[in-house]
Image (cartoon, helix red, strand yellow):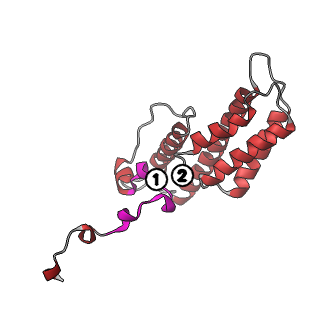
Amino acid sequence: MFNNLSDKLDKAFHVLKGHGSITEVNVAETLKEVRRALLDADVNFKIAKEFTNRVKEKALGQDVLTTLQPSQLMVKIVKDELTELMKEAVELEKEFIRDCLPVNSVGLSSDEFCTYIDFIADRRLNGIGLDVLHPGLENPFPWLAETMDVKKEQNFFEGRVTEYQKSSALSEVADDEL
């Protein structure tokens, strides 16, 4: 999901390279690719559209400094917006967890779960080349990471067929065993 997002965003910003200014046309082309990259990363359509609209407003209102290229300015705007979007999502998740776990139980408290949400958000931001929100944060639930195997995230359609076969189907069978 998020693995290729950084590469796809870099390709989207390639549209602006060589331009001396940010125009509505090249912003529209770039944001079309950004929206496509977000949708490929399984971001909700409405969120991707709102995100690109906010970036467009900021990008068109900016004067490009002589020391910056338009692509550098666009990269900064997109990175800032992605970070803000992640902050908003983290706060919503934390509110949800606090509502779901009003009473702490042994080994599972809302505070620990909020730390886990911060950990996952940092890992997502780091995965797309952005600065983390909470540097040095440790996973409070290492057992959950092992159970869920959060490091091996992949889209269903990215999986190889051999991953779904039983191990017995991969072994050789002699003709007389049939």
Residue 141 x, y percent position in the rendering? 38, 48
Q: Is residue 43 left or right of residue 19?
A: left
Q: Residue at x 72, y 29 (%)?
A: 17
- Residue 75 vertical position relative to residue 106 in the rendered view, above or below: above
Q: Earlier in the sequence, mark 1 or mark 2?
A: 2
- Tell which of 84 and 92 is nearer to you: 84
Q: Which residues are magenta?
A: 148-165
Q: Where does residue 20 sit, x and y in percent of width and height? A: 81, 24
Specify the label residue 153 is tagged with. 1
* Quarter holding residue 147: bottom left
Return the residue nearer the eye: 152 or 106.
Answer: 152
Seen in the image, is 127 located left or right of residue 11?
Answer: left
> How would you rate the neighbour count of disc 2 (Cα within 10 Å): few for under 14, some for 14-19, many for 20 or more?
some
Q: Which quarter of the figure has residue 133?
A: top right
Expressed as whole percent of the image width and height from the top left, the position of residue 166 reads: 29, 69
Residue position marked by numbered label 2 in the rendering = 1
The quadrant the C terminus occupies is bottom left
Circles 1 and 2 in contact, beta carbons < 8 Å: yes
Q: Main secondary structure of the magenta part?
A: helix
Q: Secondary structure at mark 1?
A: loop
Residue 173, quarter of the rendered image: bottom left
Instruction: Tell me if I can see residue 114 in this picture.
Output: yes
What residue appears at the point 58 percent right and 56 percent down from the top-left corner?
96
What amino acid is found at the position of numbered circle 1 in the picture? Glu
Could you tell me which residue is drawn at 50 percent across and 62 percent down?
157
Name the residue rendered at 47%, 56% in the picture.
Answer: 103
Specify the amino acid type for callout 2: Met
Which structural element holds mark 2?
A: loop
